[in-house]
Amino acid sequence: MKNFKLIITLVAIMSIFLLAACGNSEDKADEKQGSDNKTEDTSYTVEHAMGQTTIKETPKRVVILTNEGTEALLAMGIKPVGAVKSWLGDPWYDHIKDDMEGVEVVGTESEVNLEKIASLKPDLIIGTKMRQEAVYDQLSAIAPTVFSETLRGDWQENFKLYAKALNLEEKGNEVLDQFNTHLEDVKAKLGDKVNQEVSVVRFMAGKSRIYYTDSFSGVIFNQLGFKRAAQQAELFTADNKLGNLAIEVGKEVIPKMDGDVLFYFTYAPQGDPAALDTAKEWTNDPLWKNLNAVKTGNVHEVSDAVWNTAGGVIAANLMLDEIQAIFEK
Protein backbone atom coordinates (compact mmCIF):
# COMPACT_ATOMS: atom_id res chain seq x y z
CA MET A 1 0.00 0.00 0.00
CA LYS A 2 2.82 2.36 0.89
CA ASN A 3 4.51 1.63 -2.45
CA PHE A 4 1.27 2.37 -4.30
CA LYS A 5 0.93 5.78 -2.55
CA LEU A 6 4.56 6.57 -3.39
CA ILE A 7 3.94 5.81 -7.05
CA ILE A 8 0.84 8.04 -7.11
CA THR A 9 2.80 10.89 -5.49
CA LEU A 10 5.64 10.59 -8.05
CA VAL A 11 3.17 10.58 -10.95
CA ALA A 12 1.48 13.71 -9.56
CA ILE A 13 4.82 15.54 -9.23
CA MET A 14 5.85 14.57 -12.79
CA SER A 15 2.47 15.81 -14.10
CA ILE A 16 3.03 19.21 -12.46
CA PHE A 17 6.47 19.52 -14.11
CA LEU A 18 5.06 18.49 -17.48
CA LEU A 19 2.25 21.04 -17.24
CA ALA A 20 4.72 23.75 -16.25
CA ALA A 21 6.97 22.88 -19.18
CA CYS A 22 4.04 23.01 -21.59
CA GLY A 23 3.00 26.34 -20.15
CA ASN A 24 6.48 27.77 -20.62
CA SER A 25 6.56 26.52 -24.22
CA GLU A 26 3.20 28.12 -24.95
CA ASP A 27 4.31 31.37 -23.33
CA LYS A 28 7.47 31.45 -25.45
CA ALA A 29 5.47 30.66 -28.57
CA ASP A 30 3.07 33.48 -27.72
CA GLU A 31 6.02 35.84 -27.14
CA LYS A 32 7.55 34.85 -30.49
CA GLN A 33 4.24 35.34 -32.28
CA GLY A 34 3.84 38.72 -30.63
CA SER A 35 7.35 39.66 -31.70
CA ASP A 36 6.66 38.55 -35.27
CA ASN A 37 3.52 40.70 -35.35
CA LYS A 38 5.38 43.87 -34.29
CA THR A 39 6.23 46.37 -37.09
CA GLU A 40 9.60 48.05 -36.85
CA ASP A 41 9.23 51.82 -36.51
CA THR A 42 10.96 53.31 -39.58
CA SER A 43 9.46 56.79 -39.36
CA TYR A 44 11.69 59.87 -39.33
CA THR A 45 11.15 63.62 -38.99
CA VAL A 46 12.53 66.30 -41.30
CA GLU A 47 12.85 69.97 -40.34
CA HIS A 48 12.31 72.31 -43.27
CA ALA A 49 11.17 75.80 -44.31
CA MET A 50 7.55 75.20 -43.21
CA GLY A 51 8.26 73.42 -39.93
CA GLN A 52 8.54 69.66 -39.33
CA THR A 53 7.25 66.72 -41.33
CA THR A 54 7.19 63.10 -40.20
CA ILE A 55 7.62 60.50 -42.93
CA LYS A 56 6.49 56.97 -42.02
CA GLU A 57 8.97 55.07 -44.18
CA THR A 58 11.42 55.55 -47.03
CA PRO A 59 9.37 57.07 -49.88
CA LYS A 60 8.83 55.15 -53.10
CA ARG A 61 6.52 57.53 -54.99
CA VAL A 62 7.95 61.04 -55.00
CA VAL A 63 6.62 64.20 -56.61
CA ILE A 64 9.20 66.98 -57.05
CA LEU A 65 8.18 70.61 -57.57
CA THR A 66 11.51 72.29 -58.40
CA ASN A 67 13.84 71.96 -61.36
CA GLU A 68 16.98 71.68 -59.24
CA GLY A 69 15.19 69.14 -57.05
CA THR A 70 14.49 67.01 -60.11
CA GLU A 71 18.23 66.84 -60.77
CA ALA A 72 18.87 65.98 -57.12
CA LEU A 73 16.51 62.99 -57.29
CA LEU A 74 17.99 61.71 -60.54
CA ALA A 75 21.53 62.04 -59.17
CA MET A 76 20.55 59.88 -56.19
CA GLY A 77 19.03 57.23 -58.44
CA ILE A 78 15.38 58.19 -57.86
CA LYS A 79 12.96 58.68 -60.77
CA PRO A 80 10.01 60.77 -59.55
CA VAL A 81 6.47 59.75 -60.42
CA GLY A 82 5.72 63.40 -61.12
CA ALA A 83 7.72 66.59 -61.62
CA VAL A 84 7.18 70.20 -62.62
CA LYS A 85 8.01 70.99 -66.22
CA SER A 86 11.52 72.19 -67.03
CA TRP A 87 11.69 75.92 -67.70
CA LEU A 88 13.22 75.06 -71.08
CA GLY A 89 12.48 71.91 -73.08
CA ASP A 90 9.45 69.89 -74.08
CA PRO A 91 8.84 69.02 -71.32
CA TRP A 92 12.34 68.35 -69.93
CA TYR A 93 15.80 69.86 -70.34
CA ASP A 94 17.82 68.12 -73.04
CA HIS A 95 20.42 66.99 -70.52
CA ILE A 96 17.86 65.04 -68.41
CA LYS A 97 15.13 64.06 -70.87
CA ASP A 98 16.36 60.48 -71.34
CA ASP A 99 16.22 59.89 -67.57
CA MET A 100 12.73 61.41 -67.27
CA GLU A 101 10.92 59.08 -69.65
CA GLY A 102 7.53 58.14 -68.17
CA VAL A 103 7.52 60.90 -65.52
CA GLU A 104 4.22 62.80 -65.34
CA VAL A 105 4.19 66.61 -65.64
CA VAL A 106 2.49 68.25 -62.63
CA GLY A 107 2.48 71.89 -63.76
CA THR A 108 5.29 74.41 -63.41
CA GLU A 109 7.22 75.67 -60.39
CA SER A 110 5.00 78.75 -60.33
CA GLU A 111 1.69 76.90 -60.85
CA VAL A 112 1.49 73.29 -59.70
CA ASN A 113 -1.45 71.06 -60.60
CA LEU A 114 -2.87 69.81 -57.28
CA GLU A 115 -5.37 67.46 -58.88
CA LYS A 116 -2.67 65.80 -60.98
CA ILE A 117 -0.38 65.47 -57.97
CA ALA A 118 -3.13 63.80 -55.92
CA SER A 119 -3.87 61.35 -58.75
CA LEU A 120 -0.29 60.07 -58.61
CA LYS A 121 -0.74 58.96 -54.96
CA PRO A 122 2.71 60.14 -53.80
CA ASP A 123 4.13 59.21 -50.42
CA LEU A 124 6.37 62.32 -50.45
CA ILE A 125 6.14 65.76 -52.05
CA ILE A 126 9.20 68.04 -52.23
CA GLY A 127 8.83 71.72 -53.09
CA THR A 128 9.99 75.20 -52.16
CA LYS A 129 8.54 77.97 -50.01
CA MET A 130 9.74 80.53 -52.56
CA ARG A 131 7.32 79.24 -55.22
CA GLN A 132 4.62 77.17 -53.52
CA GLU A 133 4.06 78.53 -50.01
CA ALA A 134 0.42 79.36 -50.82
CA VAL A 135 -0.46 75.72 -51.53
CA TYR A 136 1.58 74.05 -48.81
CA ASP A 137 -1.47 73.04 -46.76
CA GLN A 138 -3.19 71.49 -49.78
CA LEU A 139 -0.03 69.57 -50.68
CA SER A 140 0.38 68.36 -47.10
CA ALA A 141 -3.17 67.00 -47.21
CA ILE A 142 -2.13 64.84 -50.16
CA ALA A 143 1.14 63.47 -48.74
CA PRO A 144 3.99 64.38 -46.36
CA THR A 145 5.50 67.56 -47.82
CA VAL A 146 8.98 69.04 -47.37
CA PHE A 147 9.90 72.56 -48.57
CA SER A 148 13.24 74.25 -49.14
CA GLU A 149 13.41 77.93 -48.22
CA THR A 150 14.43 79.41 -51.57
CA LEU A 151 16.05 78.76 -54.95
CA ARG A 152 19.36 80.56 -55.34
CA GLY A 153 22.91 79.71 -56.24
CA ASP A 154 23.84 77.54 -53.26
CA TRP A 155 21.92 74.48 -54.45
CA GLN A 156 23.92 72.17 -52.18
CA GLU A 157 21.95 73.23 -49.10
CA ASN A 158 18.69 72.23 -50.77
CA PHE A 159 20.28 69.01 -51.99
CA LYS A 160 21.09 67.98 -48.39
CA LEU A 161 17.48 68.64 -47.36
CA TYR A 162 16.14 66.55 -50.23
CA ALA A 163 18.50 63.68 -49.38
CA LYS A 164 17.25 63.71 -45.79
CA ALA A 165 13.61 63.76 -46.90
CA LEU A 166 14.28 60.76 -49.14
CA ASN A 167 16.08 58.94 -46.29
CA LEU A 168 19.16 58.83 -48.55
CA GLU A 169 21.62 60.99 -46.63
CA GLU A 170 24.53 58.61 -47.22
CA LYS A 171 23.89 58.53 -50.97
CA GLY A 172 23.42 62.29 -50.98
CA ASN A 173 26.78 62.86 -49.31
CA GLU A 174 28.36 60.59 -51.89
CA VAL A 175 26.92 62.66 -54.77
CA LEU A 176 28.07 65.94 -53.19
CA ASP A 177 31.54 64.53 -52.51
CA GLN A 178 31.83 63.54 -56.17
CA PHE A 179 30.82 67.04 -57.29
CA ASN A 180 33.25 68.76 -54.93
CA THR A 181 36.05 66.45 -56.05
CA HIS A 182 35.19 67.34 -59.65
CA LEU A 183 35.28 71.04 -58.76
CA GLU A 184 38.67 70.78 -57.06
CA ASP A 185 40.02 68.83 -60.03
CA VAL A 186 38.90 71.53 -62.49
CA LYS A 187 40.26 74.25 -60.21
CA ALA A 188 43.66 72.55 -60.13
CA LYS A 189 43.75 72.16 -63.92
CA LEU A 190 42.88 75.83 -64.47
CA GLY A 191 45.71 77.02 -62.24
CA ASP A 192 46.44 80.75 -62.61
CA LYS A 193 43.63 81.18 -65.14
CA VAL A 194 41.19 81.65 -62.26
CA ASN A 195 42.83 85.02 -61.54
CA GLN A 196 40.89 86.53 -64.45
CA GLU A 197 37.75 88.64 -64.01
CA VAL A 198 34.57 87.07 -65.37
CA SER A 199 31.25 88.66 -66.29
CA VAL A 200 27.94 86.84 -66.78
CA VAL A 201 25.02 88.29 -68.77
CA ARG A 202 21.52 87.00 -69.50
CA PHE A 203 19.12 88.10 -72.25
CA MET A 204 15.36 87.64 -72.03
CA ALA A 205 12.35 88.95 -73.94
CA GLY A 206 12.70 92.73 -73.75
CA LYS A 207 15.18 92.83 -70.87
CA SER A 208 18.75 92.05 -69.95
CA ARG A 209 20.54 91.26 -66.70
CA ILE A 210 24.01 91.01 -65.23
CA TYR A 211 24.22 87.92 -63.01
CA TYR A 212 26.41 88.07 -59.92
CA THR A 213 27.73 86.13 -56.95
CA ASP A 214 24.50 84.59 -55.56
CA SER A 215 23.47 83.13 -58.91
CA PHE A 216 23.97 79.49 -59.90
CA SER A 217 26.93 80.32 -62.14
CA GLY A 218 28.20 82.92 -59.67
CA VAL A 219 28.54 80.45 -56.81
CA ILE A 220 30.46 78.01 -59.02
CA PHE A 221 32.80 80.73 -60.29
CA ASN A 222 33.43 81.76 -56.68
CA GLN A 223 34.17 78.16 -55.68
CA LEU A 224 36.68 77.91 -58.52
CA GLY A 225 38.41 81.10 -57.35
CA PHE A 226 37.53 83.43 -60.24
CA LYS A 227 37.30 87.18 -59.67
CA ARG A 228 34.22 89.15 -60.69
CA ALA A 229 34.35 92.17 -62.96
CA ALA A 230 35.39 94.91 -60.52
CA GLN A 231 33.21 97.65 -62.02
CA GLN A 232 30.05 95.63 -61.36
CA ALA A 233 30.30 95.73 -57.57
CA GLU A 234 28.79 99.23 -57.38
CA LEU A 235 25.63 97.96 -59.10
CA PHE A 236 24.77 95.50 -56.35
CA THR A 237 23.71 97.79 -53.54
CA ALA A 238 21.37 97.03 -50.65
CA ASP A 239 18.34 98.37 -52.52
CA ASN A 240 18.77 96.09 -55.54
CA LYS A 241 15.56 94.05 -55.52
CA LEU A 242 17.35 90.85 -56.55
CA GLY A 243 20.19 91.25 -54.06
CA ASN A 244 23.46 89.74 -55.31
CA LEU A 245 21.64 87.38 -57.64
CA ALA A 246 21.30 89.70 -60.63
CA ILE A 247 20.37 93.21 -61.74
CA GLU A 248 18.27 94.33 -64.68
CA VAL A 249 20.05 96.95 -66.77
CA GLY A 250 19.60 99.21 -69.78
CA LYS A 251 21.97 99.55 -72.72
CA GLU A 252 23.81 102.42 -71.07
CA VAL A 253 25.21 99.85 -68.61
CA ILE A 254 26.72 97.65 -71.35
CA PRO A 255 30.26 98.99 -70.62
CA LYS A 256 29.97 97.49 -67.11
CA MET A 257 29.36 94.07 -68.68
CA ASP A 258 33.03 93.92 -69.67
CA GLY A 259 35.52 91.48 -68.14
CA ASP A 260 38.57 89.46 -69.03
CA VAL A 261 36.09 86.79 -70.09
CA LEU A 262 32.38 87.38 -70.74
CA PHE A 263 29.71 84.65 -70.76
CA TYR A 264 26.14 85.17 -71.91
CA PHE A 265 23.04 83.04 -72.27
CA THR A 266 19.49 83.64 -73.54
CA TYR A 267 16.25 82.52 -71.92
CA ALA A 268 14.05 81.72 -74.92
CA PRO A 269 11.35 79.12 -74.12
CA GLN A 270 10.22 77.35 -77.29
CA GLY A 271 12.64 79.56 -79.21
CA ASP A 272 10.84 82.75 -78.13
CA PRO A 273 11.64 85.23 -80.94
CA ALA A 274 11.36 88.24 -78.61
CA ALA A 275 14.17 86.86 -76.41
CA LEU A 276 16.30 85.95 -79.42
CA ASP A 277 15.77 89.44 -80.84
CA THR A 278 16.88 90.99 -77.53
CA ALA A 279 20.11 88.99 -77.60
CA LYS A 280 20.75 89.90 -81.25
CA GLU A 281 20.02 93.58 -80.68
CA TRP A 282 22.31 93.89 -77.66
CA THR A 283 25.22 91.89 -79.07
CA ASN A 284 25.15 94.04 -82.21
CA ASP A 285 25.08 97.32 -80.30
CA PRO A 286 28.19 99.51 -80.73
CA LEU A 287 28.71 99.59 -76.96
CA TRP A 288 28.83 95.77 -76.91
CA LYS A 289 31.21 95.63 -79.86
CA ASN A 290 33.50 98.06 -78.02
CA LEU A 291 33.93 95.76 -74.99
CA ASN A 292 37.49 94.52 -74.49
CA ALA A 293 36.21 90.95 -74.08
CA VAL A 294 34.55 91.19 -77.50
CA LYS A 295 37.62 92.73 -79.16
CA THR A 296 39.90 90.01 -77.80
CA GLY A 297 37.56 87.15 -78.69
CA ASN A 298 36.84 86.26 -75.06
CA VAL A 299 33.04 86.21 -75.27
CA HIS A 300 31.27 82.86 -75.01
CA GLU A 301 27.60 82.08 -75.58
CA VAL A 302 26.55 79.20 -73.30
CA SER A 303 23.36 77.30 -72.45
CA ASP A 304 20.79 79.09 -70.27
CA ALA A 305 19.50 75.69 -69.12
CA VAL A 306 22.89 74.44 -67.93
CA TRP A 307 24.40 77.71 -66.71
CA ASN A 308 21.36 79.12 -64.97
CA THR A 309 17.85 77.70 -65.20
CA ALA A 310 18.21 74.02 -64.25
CA GLY A 311 20.15 74.94 -61.13
CA GLY A 312 20.97 71.41 -59.94
CA VAL A 313 23.86 69.02 -59.46
CA ILE A 314 23.74 67.54 -62.97
CA ALA A 315 23.90 71.00 -64.56
CA ALA A 316 26.66 72.01 -62.12
CA ASN A 317 28.86 69.13 -63.28
CA LEU A 318 28.16 69.98 -66.93
CA MET A 319 29.05 73.62 -66.29
CA LEU A 320 32.37 72.62 -64.72
CA ASP A 321 33.22 70.59 -67.82
CA GLU A 322 32.37 73.53 -70.09
CA ILE A 323 34.42 76.00 -68.03
CA GLN A 324 37.41 73.67 -68.19
CA ALA A 325 37.04 73.21 -71.96
CA ILE A 326 36.70 76.98 -72.59
CA PHE A 327 39.69 78.02 -70.50
CA GLU A 328 41.92 75.20 -71.70
CA LYS A 329 41.57 76.59 -75.24
Image (cartoon, rainbow, N blue to C red):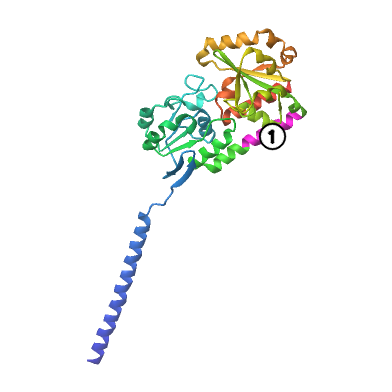
Q: Is residue 190 left or right of residue 178?
A: right
Task: Identify the residue at horizontal 68%, vertical 24% (top origin).
Answer: 234
Which residue type carries mark 1?
Answer: Glu
Q: Is residue 6 left or right of residue 65?
A: left
Q: Position of residue 303 (x, y in %)?
A: 60, 19
The main secondary structure of the magenta stretch is helix
In this view, 182 is above or below 240 = below
Inspect the magenta stretch and tell me whether residue 189 lies in it.
yes
Using a 10 Å C-alpha cutoff, classify the residue at mark 1 as few (fewer than 14 neighbours), some (14 to 19) or many (20 or more).
few
> Which residue in the rendered view is the most extreme toward the front?
239
- Dividing the image into 4 quarters, which one contains the N terminus? bottom left
Task: Identify the residue at horizontal 27%, vertical 88% (top origin).
Answer: 6
Per the image, the residue denoted by label 1 is: 184
Q: Indicate the quadrant where residue 32 lies.
A: bottom left
Q: Position of residue 139 (x, y in %)?
A: 39, 34
In this view, 299 is above or below 188 = above
Depth order, front residue of 42/159: 159
Q: Indicate the quadrant where residue 188 lies.
A: top right
Task: Identify the residue at horizontal 69%, vertical 7% (top origin).
Answer: 286
User: From which residue to which does the magenta span run?
Assistant: 178-191
